[in-house]
Amino acid sequence: MVTFGFIRHGLTDWNAEYRAQGQHDVPLNAEGLRQARLLGARLANESWDYLYTSDLSRARVTAEIAAEAMGMEVTGSDPRLREKSHGRLDGTTVADRIAAWGEDWAKLDHGEESVESILARSMDFLKEKAAEHPDKRILIVSHGAWIARTIEHLLQVEDIPHIGNTYLCVLNGGDNEGWSCTLPPCAKHLDVSAETSEDSASC
């Protein structure tokens, strides 16, 4: 049985502005770097075998800071772990969208990447790493929408608790019995409580 720890990257200026980032390579800001250091201090007290990251810098730098604190190196970066592409919404805030396309902007086709496309990438990656590293503990530093859609699919649920910047969620599985969540989205290293919902017991 493999264990995957899913981590969202640290904060960026676009996160703070509620601006869609998608696959734009937006760097961590000062708060994001601080969050990554706190994450690393937490993970240094845990046991993990491998650490993979999205190749976008906000995830990669988060992973590198955490890896250094853990006394290990990043195992690899992979474009399959990139965030969902939001199409022409990338770089925009809700106010920008209303100004450009009106109050019903969400009903229009903006060329966003489909859930099916995200899952094709994520499942391909997870199956590959589970086969390469059976019975190991593997950290993955990725992005909010990628992580949420992936976990929802693995657990066969429609919604999971909010995953904030550098939150960690841990799943076990990969065998015929399916997947289980042993740690719902957790931010104890940030000194805040992760948001919870009625589904938090299952993830």
Image: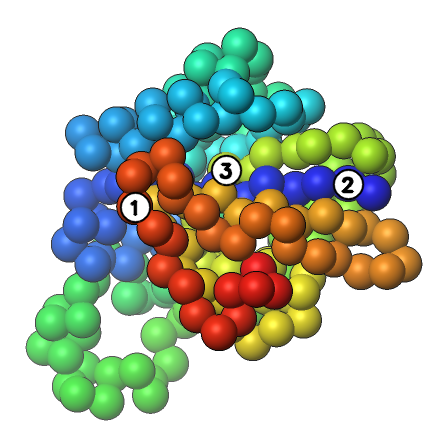
Vertical placement of 125 versus 162: above or below?
Answer: above
Residue 149 seen in render = no
Mark 2 vs mark 3, foreground winner is 2
Q: For mark 2, does the 10 Å Cα neighbourhood hold few (<14), some (14 to 19), or many (20 or more) residues?
A: some
Residue position marked by numbered label 1 in the rendering? 192
Vertical placement of 180 versus 132: above or below?
Answer: below
Residue 76: % across, % down = 60, 25
Residue position marked by numbered label 3 in the rendering? 141
Which mark sits nearer the N-terminus, 2 or 3? Answer: 2
Left or right, residue 62 beside residue 13: right
Q: Amino acid at mark 1?
A: Val
Give the distance between the C-alpha atoms of the residues marked 1 and 3, in whole angstroms. Answer: 20 Å
Q: What residue do we see at 44% from left, 70% from top?
A: 197
Q: Amino acid at mark 3?
A: Val
Residue 133: % across, % down = 80, 31
Which mark sits nearer the N-terminus, 1 or 2? Answer: 2
Q: What residue do we see at 87% from left, 52% from top?
A: 175
Q: What residue do we see at 45% from left, 59% from top?
A: 145
Figure disc tally: 3
Residue 139: % across, % down = 59, 34
Residue position marked by numbered label 2 in the rendering? 2
Q: What residue do we see at 28% from left, 58% from top?
A: 20
Q: For mark 3, does the 10 Å Cα neighbourhood hold few (<14), some (14 to 19), or many (20 or more) residues?
A: many
Mark 1–mark 2 contact, CB under 8 Å?
A: no
Name the secondary structure under disc 2. strand
Give the distance between the C-alpha atoms of the residues marked 1 and 2, in whole angstroms. Answer: 28 Å
Quadrant (top left/top right/bottom left/bottom right) for the N terminus: top right
Q: Amino acid at mark 2?
A: Val
In-front residue for pair 42/146? 42
Vertical placement of 166 versus 145: above or below?
Answer: above
In-front residue for pair 119/141? 141
